[in-house]
Image: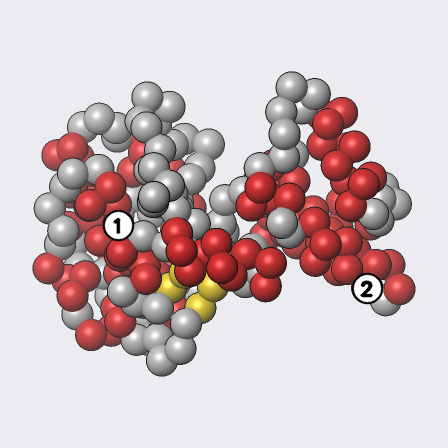
Amino acid sequence: MSRPQTLREVSAIVVAEAKPFGRAIDEFVDAFYLDHPNKLRQQQRIDDAPTIVGDAFVDTWIGAVGEHLARRWDLAVPAWTRRPAHYALASPLFVPDSSALRTTLLLESPPAFRSRLLFTFLEPLQRARFPRDAALIDQPA
Amino acid sequence: MKLKALQRENVDDRDFEDAINLAVEIAVETADQLQRLFAAFFPDEKLHPNAAARLPELVQQIRLRRKG
């Protein structure tokens, strides 16, 4: 299957078991960053509601990515990110799952992730195609 | 360079897994060796603190893999 162009396509790829979720989400994020600074095109990539995959982690991560990308790049947060399936975790998950980094992740995780019991880096979704002219999120004081 | 990539997340942590496999292949198994390897590739950079924090668990996994 080709590289996903929208978050909805990411979910379709996962449902079809066409490629691993991690690979699909990274490819989608690459496509999103390549649109920078075209906000209309970026918005279109996150607007369509993804299919609910049925895996609590995957659905929650997709919701966090949709909300985070919208907030991070000054887009409208899609309403679908508020669906209960995107808040499906019963206990916290750390990404990466590193005991050495847990305190850091607890402190840094952006709102779209921490509100879903996901704890990750201050500036998640960094890829080689991350826009070079964009300032990184500041460390909280 | 997989050590540099450890400063960012993957949902499947595949950069960490790749780093283990590569270290096993080239027989690197201490944090000091990993730091020197990084410095050889990036002489003007310091390993990001988030990546450096993972070196002990990386070393542990490399040693487990070598034993296995």
Q: What's under tag 2, amino acid-wise?
A: Leu
Circle on res. A57? none
How far apart marks 2 and 1 lie (CA) works out to 37 Å
Q: Quadrant of residue A18?
A: bottom left
Up/down of B26 relative to A80, above or below: above
**SS for callout 1:** helix
Q: Position of residue A24 (x, y in %)?
A: 41, 51
Q: Quadrant of residue A40?
A: top left
The residue that disc 2 covers is B64
Q: Position of residue B56 (x, y in %)?
A: 72, 54
Q: Residues within 10 Å of mark 2 (few under 14, many from 20)?
A: few
Q: Chain of mark 2?
A: B
Q: Position of residue B58 (x, y in %)?
A: 71, 54
Q: Residue at x 89, y 64 (%)?
A: B67
For residue A75, side relative to residue B37 (left or right)? left
The N terminus of chain B: image quadrant: top right
The residue that disc 1 covers is A68
Q: Position of residue A22 (x, y in %)?
A: 46, 55
Q: What's under tag 1, amino acid-wise?
A: His
* Residue A81 shows in the view: yes
Q: Residue at x 26, y 61 (%)?
A: A63
Q: Residue at x 62, y 24 (%)?
A: B45
Number of marks in picture: 2
**Residues at badges 2 and 1 in contact (C-beta under 8 Å)?**
no
The C terminus of chain B: image quadrant: bottom right
